[in-house]
Amino acid sequence: MHIFEGFLPSPWWQLWFVFSIPVIFFGMYRLNKLVSEKRELLPLLAVAGAFIFVLSSLKMPSVTGSSSHPTGTGMAAILFGPAIAAVLSTIVLLYQAIFLAHGGLTTLGANVASMGIIGPVFAYVIYKAGMKANINFYVVVFLATAFADWATYVVTATQLALAFPAEVGGVAASLKAFLLIFATTQVPLAIMEGALTALIFKYVIQVKSDALVELNVITESVLNKIKGANQ
Amino acid sequence: MKGEVIFGVIAVLFIASFFYGMAANPDSEFGGADGQAGDVIAEIDSEYTPWTEGTFVDSLKFEPPGGETESLLFALQAAIGAVVLGYFFGYYKGKGQSN
């Protein structure tokens, strides 16, 4: 999903900054509030950030004959909301842009939009809808995070298609070409990410379930149901 | 245990799909999808060059001299994340047991 440095012409790279910067600032405000009001949740925040660090560094081979990496942002989005996930993603993307020549500073706005904002929003919305519909907690986590991962790459394909419409067929033709790369390669990776995140949530429930209730991620009654099923 | 078993099955299926991918694409080096997108851009607009080339943007960044350094930095990123994950899960687990 990394759009490389300079690979978005004007006005696209500016537009994506305009889109992303307000969300990052709102996320920093939310983060500040969280840190000052619920200090005891700081370790869980570190875990969510670390999860993004690990997953976004793993370039995994896919069945299509190319490699890509998961995003890890779904977990942070479910725990802390999309805005805080955006801040955590920005940190990772800055590290990769500055030290790894992976992604770019001028394309940071676009990359934060896909990985840090739109993907996490998908995770958050699917999670909330799934929990409201009373579906099994782990199934909902799997669906939310797998789909967020996949959506991130669909957004990247869209960003590139908008900036590079084909001479014949325009944006639609370009989108098809970019989706063929990103969306197909990402399917097995998204499934892996969803499964791994669901497993991690099992451990979070084992060791720190009270934090999930405090963050309004799950209700007390749902928690008791999950714990009952585990025994 | 159930969760671990389901995850294990999905992981095995993922690895199997990778081997199938290797067999189906014998010439592929499994390069990054990000790079392939660059090839598509070159197809759409053969004259496009990243506009940041040679500008001050390049001087803000560290360019790894080669694949070895790059993989070191990627491994470092994963290692830092893994340490944090392990530390806090261990901390919470130990705390839970001592109560």
Image: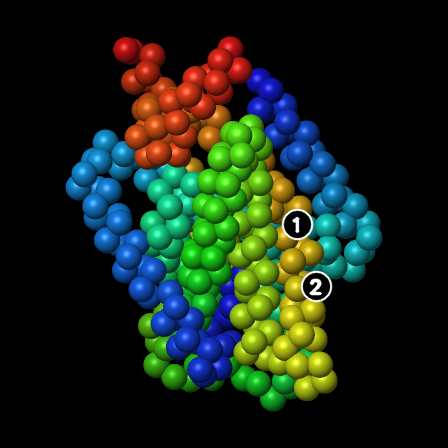
Whether residue A182 is visible to the viewer of this picture, yes or no, is: yes
Residue pointed to by mark 1: A187
Residue pointed to by mark 2: A180
Name the kind of residue labelled 1 in the image. Answer: Val
Q: Quick check: A185 left or right of B57?
A: right
Q: Name, please, the residue furthest toward the front.
A: A133
Question: Helix, strand, or loop for circle 1?
Answer: helix
Return the residue nearer the eye: B44 or A152.
Answer: A152
Return the residue nearer the eye: B94 or A210.
Answer: A210
Up-down relation of residue A180 to residue B95 (above or below)? below
Q: Earlier in the sequence, mark 1 or mark 2?
A: 2
Q: Residue at x 36, y 30 (%)?
A: A212
Q: Residues within 10 Å of mark 1 (few under 14, many from 20)?
A: some
Name the kind of residue labelled 2 in the image. Answer: Leu
Q: Which mark is residue B54?
A: none
Q: How is the image coloured?
A: rainbow
Q: Chain of mark 2?
A: A
Whether residue A59 is visible to the viewer of this picture, yes or no, is: no
Question: Helix, strand, or loop for circle 2?
Answer: helix
Q: Quadrant of the N terminus of chain A?
A: bottom right
